[in-house]
Amino acid sequence: MCGRFTLTARAEDVADQFGLSAVPALSPRYNIAPTQSVPAVRARVELLGRELVFARWGLIPAWASDPAIGARMINARAETVAEKPAYRSAFARRRCLVPADGFYEWRAVAGKKQPVCFRSRDGRPFAFAVLWEQWAAPSGEVLSSCAILTTQANELVRPIHERMPVIVAPHHYDVWLGTQAASSEALRGLLRPWLGEMTATFVSMHVNNPRHDDERCLAPPP
């Protein structure tokens, strides 16, 4: 699964990586957790280019009666996303990219949960494959939400966890965002374990508390 991630890169680097026309207002995040607001890159509706918006992490289907369901829908399995009723409409029509530059998984060590941070070897931000939805409350308020797709873990992640977030290569951004025509089969072909060079680093248990969001999350363990 993917339960926490980081986005500490400069906003200028995020804009460059994702081809944004304006530099977004982003502050370094060291411990992004479910139900929090996350940045999402989408294709602009009826306009050229891409836009960065914010969505709550935890997808709320349009038909849901209670937005609390989103806390249980932070991830969607790549293998079944095209068929599952909660995700198939978003998979067909509402795909986006969430920028990140690291994600955490945990390993049991001496009875404790030892966090491991996985990052790109070159340190640059990368893109999670994500689905988004809009949910309308009875009051009329409209809430945007999202779920990160997961797939089988690659060789680096597998000793820690059996699954990992789907990472989309830059040359596939337009396909995933829908600005290039692609079949459902072609889209599913993107949902594979990441083969790019990554690093795995044990970090401080400070990150285990989702209320902690500072540089100490990435500090070496004592």
Image (cartoon, rainbow, N blue to C red):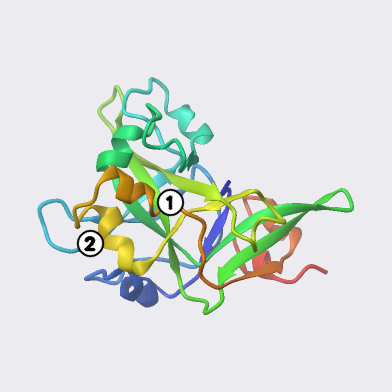
Q: Amino acid at mark 2?
A: Arg
Instruction: Specify few, some or many for label 2: CA neighbours under 10 Å numbering under 14, 14-19, or 20 or more.
Output: many
The Cα atoms of the two marked residues, 1 and 2, are separated by: 21 Å
Mark identifier at residue 50: 2
Q: Which element type, helix, strand or loop, lies under badge 1?
A: loop
Q: Residue 119's mark?
A: none
Residue 40: image quadrant is bottom left
Q: Is residue 143 visible?
A: no
In this rendering, does residue 177 appear at all? yes
The residue beneath circle 1 is 191
Position of residue 222 measured from the top left corner of the image (x, y, whole percent): 83, 69
Q: Is residue 117 left or right of residue 73?
A: right
The location of residue 144, given as percent across then percent down, is 33, 41
Amino acid, disc 1: Leu
In the image, farthest residue toward the left:
46
Q: Which quadrant of the structure image shows residue 30?
A: bottom right
Q: Position of residue 62 (x, y in %)?
A: 31, 28
**Which residue is drawn at the image coordinates 66% and 68% (left, top)?**
200
Q: Is residue 209 above or below residue 136?
A: below
| Helix, strand or loop under label 2 | strand
Tell me: 216 left or right of 5. right
Residue at 29% over, 72% down: 23
